[in-house]
Image (tube, rainbow, N blue to C red):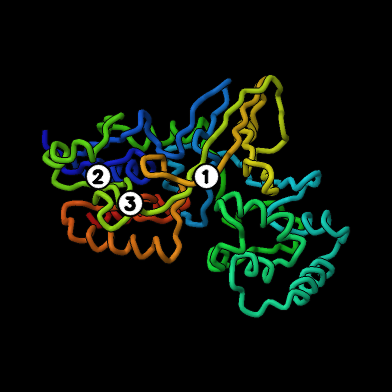
Amino acid sequence: MKYDYLIVGAGLYGAVVAHEAVAKGRSCLVIDKREHIAGNIYTREVEGIQVHEYGAHIFHTSDKKIWDYVNRFAEFNHYINSPVAVFKDELYNLPFNMNTFSKMWGIRTPQEAKEKIAGQIAGLGIMEPKNLEEQALSLVGEDVYRKLVKGYTEKQWGRDCTELPAFIIKRLPLRFTYDNNYFNDRYQGIPAGGYTAMVERILKGVEVKLGVDYLEHRAEFDGMADRVVYTGQIDRYFDYCEGVLAYRKVRFEQEILDCDNYQGNAVVNYTEREVPYTRIIEHKHFEFGTQPKTVISKEYPGEWQKGEEPYYPVNDEKNNAVYEAYKKLAEKERHVVFGGRLGEYRYYDMDKVIGRALETAEKY
């Protein structure tokens, strides 16, 4: 059988490209090496709860076109992401806002908070930050950095903040209002029934084969289609000829608990470096669940090794240079389009993934 398009990867990017291709009368085959669709936004029902198997995913966007697009495939609830952070025996609201500052310093007004932060920054005398620690201190001062930034960041990256480049943190938003909404976007929510059901609807009418590794059967699959849309690791596609791109990985430790409410919030960050996990997700709160039991996931970041599941690209100067070498090779692959988080070696929010996929569909 001959297809117009072979799409490698049944995640959000691949699913949207496939949907658009079929809608325009093109024939399409989607394959994925995993045994499920939806990529890292895959959700699975456990105890009547939609569990985010690969970490919390909250859909948010300010692009009405994208919001209208996803609402064709799911009904979104009114969930607002309002995480909290635990440092030792203290609990703070995120993002950094007046609730945070009031708890930290016993103050009430924005002017008091601004003066406190400005005073701490001035006292440090940092003119040109030489590393991430100095950059963060110059943005938020000593107290916020030590309690809410330092340990969490060091766990995420697996090294001291003094060893990380300053450019990783370009800004740390400070809000001088009593507003715990993490995102500034106009539209936000979780699809009722989970992301897997949403992606199933996007892929309706599309042929899908799971548990198939494209690169192990490339010659066979390339002969099936006129064009390939590849959403896997770009360095693996070229057999790592320019070097191995670095990622951070995440290990998820899931528990079913015999209680109806474990932590009272969907997302709780643990900002001490001594606590091995970065956060605990209680999945039922994404959909305001009332089930008698609850499901939590602890997230443990770690060093990624080739062959493991990659999560976050390490977009430092060295890895970006390696990616640019692969990008030049990719431009010579006339029948292949490289897209998505792994194909373009960059982190994308879900709305940006959809936007890029729609651009690809329009172009080809």
Determine the image quadrant of residue 161.
Answer: bottom right
Crowd band around label 1 with a 10 angstrom C-alpha radius: few (<14), some (14–19), many (20+): some
Measure how far apart labels 1 and 2 are at the Cα level.
37 Å
Mark 2: amino acid: Ala
- Would residue 100 be found to the left or right of residue 337 on screen? right
View extreme (right): residue: 106
- Would residue 309 be found to the left or right of residue 261 on screen? left
Q: Is residue 183 above or below residue 195?
A: below
Mark 1: amino acid: Gly
The residue under label 2 is 21
- Would residue 45 be found to the left or right of residue 227 on screen? right
Q: Nearer the viewer, residue 85 or 229?
A: 85
The residue under label 3 is 343
Mark 3 lies on a secondary structure that is helix
Q: Nearer the viewer, residue 331 or 75?
A: 331
Where residue 201 appears, as percent x and y from the top left, is 38, 34
Q: Is residue 241 visible?
A: yes
Q: Nearer the viewer, mark 1 or mark 2?
A: 1
Measure how far apart labels 2 and 3 are at the Cα level.
19 Å
Where residue 358 appears, as percent x and y from the top left, is 33, 52
Mark 1 lies on a secondary structure that is strand
Q: Residue at position x 76%, y 50% from top?
A: 92
Determine the image quadrant of residue 124.
Answer: bottom right
Q: Residue at position x 88%, y 58% from top?
A: 106
Q: Is residue 65 visible?
A: no
Q: Earlier in the sequence, mark 2 or mark 3?
A: 2
Mark 3: amino acid: Gly
Q: Which mark is residue 302?
A: 1
